[in-house]
Image (cartoon, rainbow, N blue to C red):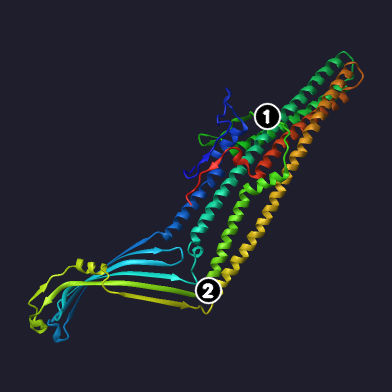
Amino acid sequence: MKSSIILVLVLTLFFKPSFPQEDKALSFSLEDCIVKALKDNLNVAVEVYNPDLADASLTKAKEFFLPRLDLGFGNERTENPSYWWLEQADVVVRKYNDYSVSLVQQIPTGGNFTLGLTGYKSDTTAGFQIMNPTYGNTLRFNFTQPLLKGFGFNVSRREIIVARNNLDISVNQFQSVLMDTIYKVQEAYWNLVYSIEDYKVKQQSLQLARDLLAKNKKEVEVGKIAPIEILNAEAVVASREADILQAEALTRRNEDVLRDLLYLTEEGEMSTKRIVPLDKPSFIRKDISLDEALKEALEKRPELRMKKINIETNELNMGVAKNQMLPGLDLQLSYWSPGLAGDRLIYPDGDPFQGAIGKEEGSPADSIRDAFKLLYDNWTIGLTLSIPLSSFTSRADYVRAKMELEKSQLELENIEKQIFLDVKNAVRDIETNAKRVQAYRLARELAEERLEAEVKKLNVGLTTNYFVLQYQEGLERERSLELKSLIDYNLAWARLEKAVGSSLEKRNIKISQFNK
């Protein structure tokens, strides 16, 4: 799992799956399975990359407002024949070197400023020069600010805001995947528990049928009952053996579903070891308020948060598209300070026609010093108005952004409606299954009493095997129904947990905060 995603698991039960002595079985509690699925499930492993990718996109978007340093250097040499006598040379050679250093900074209002220093060195063999070589440097400040199109904090920072919203969406999507995984593990776990317990119920029923068959055979031998009773009992035994095979196949199927969610492997291959659930379904009546559950769901459901963030992004896009329909009006401001130095040539009596008799040496540092002294006052200020003759594209972007916003608002209403239905159905299922558990428990107890009474009647010859077998089947059915209602009750609580978005909070699972 990537380092930027940290699942902090503070569970009442630590992940310590017990391994029985048998080499072909693994025992897990429900919380063991949940923790292992969050660590090893492939869907979770794939989804964990998305927040990291979104975080990288946010970091890249922020780089737009980091200062930029530009460096430039040029070297030029020209050699030309002299075309007039004042150059005092047959061939004129000019050497020109230039450099530039500038710092460029974007600002949140949409503008930018540049602070730079440009300089050059010029050297020539031509005559009639005041300074040769010549060193020039200019310190310059430029500022550009859009006043209409492109103006505004949201416009200039759009990429950062969108990237931050995408990061929030990816984190919420990751939470949603975790919650789905938790519910799928709960569903698979309880379904496996049901199939195992139902298998035991069918084994008990089969054993009752076999006991009755053995009893009938003994009574036929002594002539107490007719041989037809053996055939009836054998038919029931065969039917219940078929039920056992079906229950065993269902157990294997549910085991495979849970094994896939936990990603149980051995040496790179999927494990074939049996899974033994340690937890049994419990029945604890708890009151639940629909209003409180709905309020909690509206606060915690990640799908709702994702859609709200998406609406914020669409509102931003519509605002930017509306801004792009405005004419361009840009303010430009410049200020610069030049500095000049070099080797100043000395002519006799100031007459350059007599040729230079010496020079006063200068240096590039002199021109740089003069530039920073701001000895000369040079500035410009201006406005540039740009009116597009056609704005079909910008208008199309605005219409598209507006429709995207309206669409996302309708989707938000639909999600809120679906959340209400999810919570309402989960609450209703809890209440219904609680009543089913009580009803089927009573039915199972009555079926046990009825079978016990019928067996006593059979022992004294007041009934037949047919009715005993019927009551056995009735008891098996009631036991299965009670078990199913109990499993459904626990799954209803799991669905409510998912519907209100409390799966992670209940287990103290948190996702580390990103740098926003």
> Residue 148 appears at what percent x and percent y?
50, 72
Q: Along the horizontal axis of the image, is 443 left or right of 300?
A: right
Q: Position of residue 386 (x, y in %)?
A: 47, 77
Q: Furthest-right residue in view?
A: 462
Picture coordinates of residue 470, whole percent (x, y):
85, 27
Looking at numbered disc 1 in the image, what kind of residue is underneath it?
Lys
- What SS does tag 1 mark? loop
| Residue under numbered circle 1 | 280
Task: Please rate how many residues cluster around mark 2, counting C-alpha atoms within 10 Å: few if below 14, some from 14 to 19, many from 20.
Answer: some
Nearer to me, 118 or 208: 118
Describe residue 424's horizontal placement relative to residue 132 as left or right. right
Residue where numbered disc 2 is placed: 326
Whether residue 474 is situated above or below residue 292 in the rendered picture: above
> Where is residue 246, by image quadrant?
top right
Residue 129: x, y in percent?
A: 15, 79
- Quarter of the image for residue 191 reads top right
